[in-house]
Image: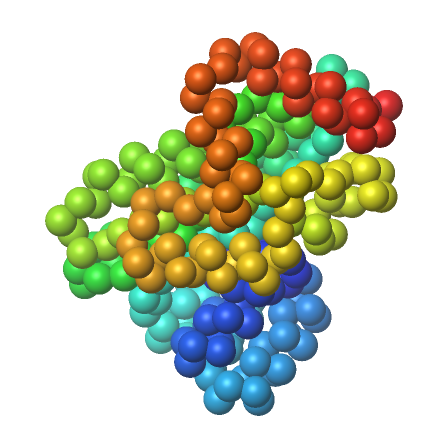
């Protein structure tokens, strides 16, 4: 599991451990996942291995695979949760920052999936859970690169789901709405500036994602309001949606 040091990723780890699942946690914040690993092992009697790694670095996926091989671990499921947001107009941003975002949200996710998927297919069992976002369904001004990266994750997952039909391996794409966590501040949102009617906790979001994953659903959108929002976007041109998104963010105080 990637990105397990906080937010939805931490909740995934806690809930998998509660179900008796053994874990491999990968995150840049080694101290945090070491603390979490010890807590989960003591509370639930599960084995938890940790790897401190910045997945945005080149060949990070191969380093994860090498770690698994050294530990003699064959995974039954991959939860690709690691990701980063960015709330700033591309024309006013440091070009390296959105590229780093794409390295983590797109390249690392794809690399790790591509490297671990063949083993799952060879065994004819298991699955992959990819964490996208509600913004994977429409463009978002001032978050254009982030929204595009999540649209890629959603498209990749849904394509793989069809591609793997009959293999015994399934892919679930989780598309959460706003989840209060450290993500918003790290992305550049002002404190308290992001709040939506479809907001859910990290715990509820992870629970919905795992429920859908175990039921082998192709797509999970937690929350009725969020599902309604996605249904509505199918009837409206993307140019209109972008304008509405810009208006909402301006009213929230997000835009500089």
The residue lying toward the viewer, choosing from 138 and 93, is 138
What percent of the width, then of the height, locates residue 220? Answer: 42, 46
Residue, x 74% and y 15% (percent of image)? 91
Residue 140 appears in view = yes
Q: Is residue 138 above or below residue 16?
A: above
**22 left or right of 189 in image:** left
| Up/down of 14 relative to 185, above or below | below
Of residue 242 and residue 93, the one placed in the foreground of this image is 242
Please state, as top left, top right, bottom left or bottom right, where the C terminus lies in the image.
top right
Picture quadrant where residue 216 is located: bottom left
Q: Position of residue 155 (x, y in %)?
A: 38, 32
Residue at x 67%, y 77% (from the top left corner): 35
Q: Nearer the viewer, residue 232 or 137?
A: 232
Picture quadrant of residue 143: top right
Q: Is residue 254 left or right of residue 112?
A: right
Return the residue nearer the eye: 138 or 161.
138
Q: Is residue 179 left or right of residue 68?
A: right
Counting from the top left corner in percent of width and height, residue 108 is at: 49, 44
Which residue appears at 53% of the width and 39% of the height?
226
Q: Residue furthest left?
A: 166
Instruction: Point out residue 77 in the picture as x, y percentages from the top left corner.
Output: 35, 62
Give me the residue at 50% from left, 48% from top. 222
Q: Indicate whether 112 appears above or below 4.
A: above
């Amino acid at each position: 599991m990637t990105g397990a040091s906080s937010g939805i990723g931490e909740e995934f780890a806690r809930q998998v451990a509660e179900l008796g699942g053994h874990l491999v946690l990968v995150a840049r914040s080694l101290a945090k996942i070491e603390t979490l690993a010890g807590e989960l092992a003591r509370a639930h009697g599960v084995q938890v291995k940790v790897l401190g790694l910045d997945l945005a670095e080149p060949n990070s996926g191969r380093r994860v695979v090498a770690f698994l091989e050294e530990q003699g671990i064959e995974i039954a499921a991959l939860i690709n949760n690691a990701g980063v947001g960015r709330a700033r107009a591309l024309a006013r941003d440091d070009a390296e920052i959105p590229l780093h975002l794409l390295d983590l949200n797109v390249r690392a996710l794809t690399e790790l999936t591509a490297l671990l998927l063949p083993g799952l297919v060879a065994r004819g069992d298991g699955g992959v859970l990819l964490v996208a976002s509600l913004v994977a369904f429409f463009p978002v001004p001032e978050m254009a690169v982030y929204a595009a990266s999540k649209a890629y994750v959603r498209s990749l997952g849904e394509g793989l789901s069809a591609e793997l039909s009959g293999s015994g391996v399934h892919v679930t794409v989780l598309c959460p709405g706003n989840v209060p966590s450290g993500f918003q501040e790290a992305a550049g949102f002002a404190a308290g500036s992001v709040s939506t009617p479809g907001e859910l906790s990290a715990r509820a979001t992870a629970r919905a994602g795992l429920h859908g994953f175990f039921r082998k659903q192709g797509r999970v959108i937690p929350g009725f309001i969020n599902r309604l929002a996605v249904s509505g976007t199918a009837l409206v041109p993307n140019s209109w949606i972008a304008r509405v998104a810009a208006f909402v963010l301006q009213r929230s105080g997000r835009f500089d």
